[in-house]
């Protein structure tokens, strides 16, 4: 197919990540690692059950899954034309122009770097809980966080071949325990599984904004399939198949696990409100026995570690793509000659995590209570903004004649519908931002200005002549 001449720049092998290192299954597990179903149940979804729409969260997850399926129709259209480690920003730049792509690049980079730091903190926090419950050892969370940071750095440096094996094992372990718990609840309390969870009056009563943002956050690793496109075998086909498979798998896991927790109690909202973070542990203790609590707490810690590794890889690949395009110093595009990984960008990401976490260590702040609200707010708004931009890019690219051969549904109708609905969710989140973060702090309320500043900076430096290779990996 033809693309504008000014968007094609020749490239050399020296600025490529290692090719043919990951297939469909590996890409799916990297998405699952980033979304971390078990950690979502221990945090996001439990909070949604407690303070959101309650049992209606099950139906809301289905609606969000359908919305993401509609979004994916346009997303895979662009994945057939753009293969780039900075997926969303190249996708957005393809239809909306390089300045918009540059702006979105910094939004994604900020969001994924903060998410990686947040997952490291959570790993330390839940590892402390797991270790102290099984032994007499009680160390500060940041000691375990430092170990998690070292493991993350090592796995990121070695590359996706070893990382996908680690994350696959953790993901499979999560599936086993979630399914095991669901079956136990089904056997012991089958009457709890009611179709009322899909009733509109259940899905839209309560704090809808809080529930929506946590539903969206549950799918926060959705972009990982395209991010690994340069390292994938048969990239265009792999991205499409992996994206749809990952989405279907996540919808089933999130819906099934949430429905199981709802079925486990006569009034799940009241139980969850007492201790949202302990909801899944209490459920496992009740239906699987006391032995399961310790195992589950350890698995939750490993799940957060897998998520930290996934977001570290996503953030470092964004910075690699920005360095290659000229939006960041070119050293960020340095690739390790042995492992084919973005070694400088990976080191920078670890440094950013340290910069984010050290103030919380010095202040002796609780990482879950103080750090997570800010991270969740920024990440949710950033991801929504990127997905809206991607949807708009598909529509504009279609009208510019860049998507010849694509159906009306995938190139115009689906992305337009998805973009409008995602924008509506974004408005709801902004209006109810204090409820979403659970914090009244003006500092937390002002945090979304960070990705906005990043977007402005990205657009400005492109306009000043940088980022000339922004879309160098368009298909020819």
Image (tube, rainbow, N blue to C red):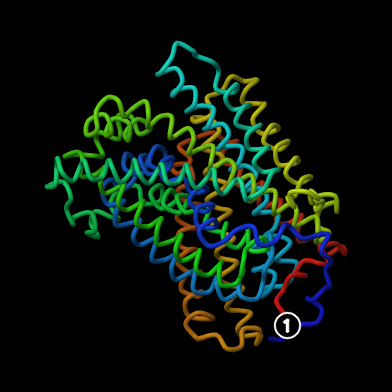
Frontmost residue, 430 versus 191: 191
Residue at image location 74% in from the left, 70% down from the top: 473
- Can you say which quadrant of the picture contains the N terminus? bottom right
Q: Nearest the camera: 188 or 209?
A: 188
Q: Secondary structure at mark 1?
A: loop
Disc count in the image? Answer: 1
Instruction: Please indicate whether residue 50 sits to the left or right of residue 324 in the image.
Output: left
Residue 446 shows up from this direction: no
Going 66% across and 60% down the picture, which residue do you hit? 231
Q: Is residue 416 left or right of residue 12?
A: left
Residue 383 found in image quarter: bottom right
Question: Going by the picture, which residue comes out furthest to the left?
Answer: 191
Q: Nearer the viewer, residue 400 or 21?
A: 21
Q: Position of residue 45 (x, y in %)?
A: 37, 44
Residue, x 52% and y 43% (percent of image)?
376
User: Which residue is identified by label 1?
Assistant: 3
Work out which quarter of the rendered image holds the C terminus and state it.
bottom right
Seen in the picture, residue 257 relative to 421 is either above or below; the reply is above
Q: Is residue 34 above or below residue 393?
A: above
Q: Position of residue 468 (x, y in %)?
A: 84, 67
Seen as rendered, the residue at the extreme right is 465
Tell me the crowding category of disc 1: few under 14, some 14 to 19, or many 20 or more residues within 10 angstroms, Cα based.
Answer: some
Task: Give me the residue at 54% from left, 57% from top.
Answer: 27
Residue 136 locus on image (x, y percent): 45, 11
Q: Nearer the viewer, residue 203 or 166?
A: 166
Q: Is residue 292 visible?
A: yes
In this rendering, position of residue 348 left or right of residue 243: right
């Amino acid at each position: 197919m033809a693309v504008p001449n000014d968007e094609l720049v020749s490239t050399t092998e020296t600025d490529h990540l290692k090719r043919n290192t990951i297939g469909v299954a590996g890409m799916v597990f990297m998405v699952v690692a980033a979304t971390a179903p078990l950690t979502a149940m221990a945090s996001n979804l439990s909070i949604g059950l407690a303070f959101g729409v309650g049992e209606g969260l099950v139906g809301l997850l289905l609606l969000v899954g359908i919305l993401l399926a509609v979004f994916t129709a346009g997303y895979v259209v662009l994945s057939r034309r753009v293969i780039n480690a900075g997926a969303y920003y190249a996708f957005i730049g393809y239809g909306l122009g390089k300045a918009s792509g540059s702006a979105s690049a910094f939004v994604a980079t900020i969001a994924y770097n903060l998410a990686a730091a947040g997952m490291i903190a959570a790993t330390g926090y839940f590892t402390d809980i797991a270790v102290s419950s099984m032994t007499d050892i009680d160390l500060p969370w940041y000691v375990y966080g430092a170990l998690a940071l070292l493991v993350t750095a090592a796995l990121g440096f070695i590359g996706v071949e070893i990382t996908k094996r680690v994350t696959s094992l953790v993901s499979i372990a999560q599936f086993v325990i979630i399914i095991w718990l669901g079956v136990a609840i089904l056997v012991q309390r089958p009457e709890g599984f009611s179709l009322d969870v899909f009733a509109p009056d259940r899905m839209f009563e309560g704090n809808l904004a809080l529930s929506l943002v946590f539903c969206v956050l549950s799918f926060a690793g959705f972009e990982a399939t395209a991010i690994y496109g340069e390292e994938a075998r048969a990239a265009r086909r792999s991205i499409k198949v992996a994206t749809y498979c990952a989405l279907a798998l996540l919808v089933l896991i999130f819906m099934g696990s949430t429905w199981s927790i709802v079925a486990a109690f006569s009034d799940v909202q009241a139980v969850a409100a007492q201790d949202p973070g302990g909801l899944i542990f209490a459920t496992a203790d009740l239906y699987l026995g006391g032995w399961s609590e310790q195992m589950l707490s350890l698995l939750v810690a490993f799940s957060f570690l897998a998520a930290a590794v996934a977001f570290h890889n996503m953030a470092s690949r964004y910075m690699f793509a920005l360095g290659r395009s000229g939006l960041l110093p070119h050293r960020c595009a340095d690739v390790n000659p042995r492992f084919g990984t973005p070694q400088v960008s990976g080191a920078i990401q670890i440094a950013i995590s340290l910069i984010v976490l050290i103030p919380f260590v010095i202040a002796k702040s609780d990482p879950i209570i103080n750090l997570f609200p800010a991270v969740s707010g920024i990440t949710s708004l950033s991801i929504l903004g990127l997905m809206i931009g991607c949807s708009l890019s598909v529509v504009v690219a279609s009208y510019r004649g860049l998507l010849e051969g694509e159906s009306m549904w995938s190139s115009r109708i689906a992305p337009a519908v998805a973009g409008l609905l995602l924008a509506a969710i974004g408005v709801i989140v902004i209006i109810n931002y204090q409820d979403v973060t659970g914090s009244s702090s003006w500092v937390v309320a002002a945090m979304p200005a960070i990705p906005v500043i990043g977007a402005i900076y990205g657009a400005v430096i492109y306009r000043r002549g940088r980022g000339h290779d922004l879309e160098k990996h368009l298909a020819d």
